[in-house]
Image (tube, helix red, strand yellow):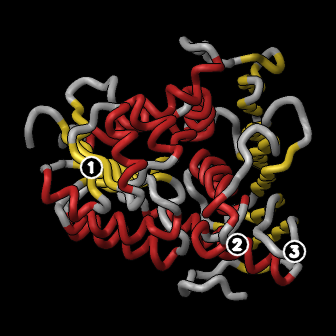
């Protein structure tokens, strides 16, 4: 590999334009060498804006024009598997936007392909890289909060702030509605903080227009080792601000991400043990993407391998169980995915 990591981008949508490309263009020893999108004119316009030398309609066409070490996948959810497999087939490392794909069976194929090819595969769950969330996970992992009884995670977006249109409103292309869009990230964060425990049972409720995907969801997970996780997500919050929070309740303390605060029982009573943040809260979201890329690039350079995203298979099994529960109107036991929703 050359000293500079050569990155190709597959998909020229909002995630690429607003988040990833501005960050990549500022990273040292990283060169964005190509952009591929079926909308060739759109891709060319964006490539000119970010000074990307090569444009094609797909990854194969891009490979004919330039060499690359890694591929960023920013396609609609249903196209993730094809894009990831194409990149792996070319021997490229892959950073794929969340969710990794739309079914547990599909995720399992991607993990096996990456493992067999010996390439790095990272799902862009950027909230894992927030400094406040990492601090909470550290306290949980070290047992400082005692036995964890309960985790509540919410991601409530205002309807006017970022309306979901296009493929995100298409069940076949998105894999679902808000539960797949925001719920995948919200549940991943809660389970990751806990070290991805086994889930015994799932109870989910969804709501939305009868002729479209769900626009709101409430989920309860009963964990195998005791304890519970709840998650609420919506695209239609009526409020002045979006709401995103993780709240952890343990036998010896609590942790809250909004506002960031960690308290625990001490010899003289309850004490505030919140570690200071070196960056303002407003910068945490953008910083998380930078840290995500730093982690991925360390794996690409062979400095610190990225763990195979086996946990994303388990996440999609949970999501499939959520949809089964919502469709049936009852609690369901978690079972391995058979590639269908079990509807």
The reply, left or right, for residue 101 in relation to residue 325 is left
- Figure check: 68 above or below 113: above
Which comes sooner in the sequence, label 2 or label 1?
1
Q: CA distance from mark 1 to mark 3?
A: 40 Å
Q: Which residue is mark 1?
A: 55
Which comes sooner in the sequence, label 3 or label 2?
2
**Which residue appears at 78% of the width and 50% of the height?**
235
Q: CA distance from mark 2 to mark 1?
A: 47 Å
Q: Residue furthest right?
A: 238
Task: Tell me the element at label 2.
Answer: strand
Q: Nearer the viewer, mark 1 or mark 3?
A: 1
Q: Nearer the viewer, mark 3 or mark 2?
A: 3
**Do tag 2 and tag 1 residues touch (Cβ < 8 Å)?**
no
**Which residue appears at 72% of the width and 59% of the height?**
178
- Figure check: 184 above or below 269: below
Q: Nearer the viewer, residue 99 or 263?
A: 99
Q: Quadrant of residue 169?
A: bottom right
If the image is split into quadrants, where does the N terminus sit?
top left
Q: Position of residue 216 (x, y in %)?
A: 82, 58
Q: Nearer the viewer, residue 29 or 311?
A: 29
Q: Residue furthest left?
A: 2
Q: Position of residue 284 (x, y in %)?
A: 58, 25
Task: Tell me the element at label 1.
Answer: strand
Q: Which residue is mark 3?
A: 210
Residue 200: mark in rendering: 2
Q: Position of residue 244 (x, y in %)?
A: 74, 38
Q: Residues within 10 Å of mark 2 (few under 14, many from 20)?
A: some
Q: Nearer the viewer, mark 2 or mark 1?
A: 1
């Amino acid at each position: 590999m050359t000293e500079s990591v050569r990155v190709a981008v597959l998909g020229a949508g909002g995630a690429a334009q607003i988040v990833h490309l501005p960050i990549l263009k500022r990273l040292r020893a990283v060169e964005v060498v190509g952009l591929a999108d079926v909308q060739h004119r759109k891709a060319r316009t964006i490539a000119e804006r970010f000074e990307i030398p090569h444009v094609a309609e797909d990854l194969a066409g891009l490979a004919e024009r330039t060499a690359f070490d890694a591929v960023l996948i920013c396609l609609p959810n249903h196209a993730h598997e094809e894009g990831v497999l194409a990149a792996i087939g070319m021997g490229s490392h892959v950073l794929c936007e969340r969710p990794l794909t739309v079914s547990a069976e599909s995720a399992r194929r991607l993990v096996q392909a990456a493992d067999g090819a010996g390439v790095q595969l990272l799902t862009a769950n950027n909230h894992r890289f927030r400094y406040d969330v990492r601090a909470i996970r550290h306290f949980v992992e070290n047992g400082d909060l005692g036995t964890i009884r309960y985790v509540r995670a919410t991601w409530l977006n205002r309807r006017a702030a970022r309306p979901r249109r296009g493929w995100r409103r298409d069940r076949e292309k998105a894999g679902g509605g808000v539960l797949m869009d925001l719920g995948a990230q919200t549940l991943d964060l809660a389970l990751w903080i806990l070290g991805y425990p086994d889930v015994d049972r799932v109870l989910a409720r969804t709501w939305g227009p009868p002729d479209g995907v769900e626009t709101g969801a409430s989920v309860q997970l009963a964990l195998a080792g005791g304890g519970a996780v709840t998650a609420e997500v919506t695209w239609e919050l009526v409020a002045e601000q979006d709401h995103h929070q993780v709240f952890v309740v343990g036998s010896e303390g609590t942790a809250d991400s909004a506002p960031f605060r960690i308290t625990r029982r001490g010899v003289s009573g309850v004490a505030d043990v919140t570690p200071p943040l070196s960056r303002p809260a407003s910068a945490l979201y953008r910083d998380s993407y930078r840290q995500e890329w730093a982690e991925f690039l360390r794996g690409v350079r062979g400095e610190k391998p990225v763990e195979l995203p086996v946990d994303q298979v388990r996440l999609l099994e949970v999501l499939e169980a959520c949809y089964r529960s919502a469709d049936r109107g009852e609690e369901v036991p978690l079972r391995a995915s058979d590639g269908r929703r079990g509807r």
